[in-house]
Image (cartoon, rainbow, N blue to C red):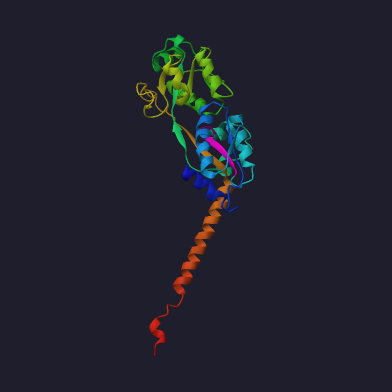
């Protein structure tokens, strides 16, 4: 937490040496209760203690995370507004039409705070025990399979599409407002599969309410050591690790870089003056 706090302190130091003097505001671009919501909250709580100011969290979903992103881009670049960014924001420019900002130019990340696997889960009633069972069923009746996601452009959406394209079958995408709804419809059997964040899915896997077929990361997840990866199952280029990174308006970091540059210049000038100053010898004043 100290490292993350230092990143925000350095960003705001050009504005005020006493930062922070008021609560910070954090935007989470998806619904409450999802992994995209829980991971940042788990980080913001100790960060607030480190900074000595509360961090007020607001869930503002929609448009692949870009509604929350736009709120942060338009905020005063004073170090008091944070975006819980991640996988969705990196692909938003390719799937969200008429984006109101440029992700690469208008937002800047502090540091990565987490990386996790999604797990491919299915309803027990389907009878699928392996990834190959799911793929065979999908190919047997093209277009009959559907899958849920936490919204268009989310990591759960991208994971499902990478897997589907690698396996070579058609499926109907059902985007939800958040991960809780996407998971609920797999549990109820209304949806065929979902790439769910592993931390969210684990309790339901353990009690048999859903079946885990594969994980999305290149290596197996320690929480599910007996569940293969989609790569191990034979589907090339189907892997994806979902990540989270706090972001601020890029102008905050530009200000910090200018401040750092100015300080470096001042140090150089001081060192030059010292190097050029006459070095008087005590003996020079003794006749």
Question: Does the image show residue 196?
Answer: yes
Between 31 and 251, which is closer to the camera in this rendering? 31
Residue 21's place in the image compared with 137, above or below, is: below
Image label count: 0
Q: Which residue is drawn at 42% across and 80% down?
A: 280
Residue 226: image quadrant is top left
Q: Nearer the viewer, residue 86 or 234?
A: 86
- Between 263 and 231, the residue placed more toward the observer is 263
In the rendered structure, does residue 162 fall within the stretch colored magenta?
no
In the rendered image, the vertical position of residue 194 relative to residue 154, given as above or below: above
Judge whether 228 appears above or below 14 on screen: above
Vertical comparison of 55 with 131: above or below? below
Location of residue 174 by image quarter: top right
Q: Position of residue 213 (x, y in %)?
A: 41, 18
Question: x and y percent of residue 218 in the render?
Answer: 38, 29
Residue shown at 48%/11% (left/top)?
141
- Magenta region, residue range: 80-88
Q: Which residue is drawn at 49% across and 35% down?
A: 244
| Image side of residue 227 versus residue 62, left or right | left
Q: Where is residue 42 in the image (x, y as percent from the top left)?
A: 50, 33
Say if the magenta span includes residue 87. Answer: yes
Figure quadrant of the C terminus: bottom left
Q: Is residue 120 visible?
A: no
Q: Position of residue 264 (x, y in %)?
A: 50, 60
């Amino acid at each position: 937490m100290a490292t993350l706090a230092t990143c925000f302190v350095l960003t705001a130091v050009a504005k005020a040496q006493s930062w922070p003097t008021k609560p910070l505001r954090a935007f989470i671009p998806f619904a409450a209760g999802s992994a995209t919501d829980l991971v940042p909250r788990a980080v913001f709580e100790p960060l607030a203690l480190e900074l000595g100011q509360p961090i007020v969290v607001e869930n503002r979903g929609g448009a692949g995370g870009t509604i929350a992103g736009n709120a942060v881009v338009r905020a005063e670049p004073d170090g008091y507004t944070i975006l819980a960014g991640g996988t969705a924001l990196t692909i938003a420019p390719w799937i969200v039409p008429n984006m109101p900002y440029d992700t690469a130019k208008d937002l800047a990340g502090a540091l990565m705070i987490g990386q996790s696997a999604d797990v491919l889960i299915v309803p027990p009633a389907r009878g699928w025990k392996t990834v190959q069972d799911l793929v065979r069923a999908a190919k047997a009746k093209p277009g009959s399979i559907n899958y849920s996601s936490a919204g268009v452009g989310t990591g759960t959406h991208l994971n499902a599409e990478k897997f589907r394209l690698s396996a070579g079958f058609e499926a109907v995408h059902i985007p939800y407002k958040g991960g809780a709804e996407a998971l609920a419809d797999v549990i109820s059997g209304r949806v065929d599969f979902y790439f769910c964040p592993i931390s969210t899915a684990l309790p339901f896997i353990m009690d048999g309410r859903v079946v885990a077929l594969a994980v999305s990361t290149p290596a197996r997840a320690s929480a599910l050591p007996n569940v293969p990866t989609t790569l191990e199952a034979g589907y090339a280029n189907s892997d994806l690790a979902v990540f989270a990174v706090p972001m601020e308006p890029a102008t905050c970091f530009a200000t910090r870089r200018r401040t750092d540059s100015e300080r470096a210049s001042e140090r150089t000038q001081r060192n030059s003056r010292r190097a050029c100053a006459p070095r008087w010898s005590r003996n020079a004043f003794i006749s």
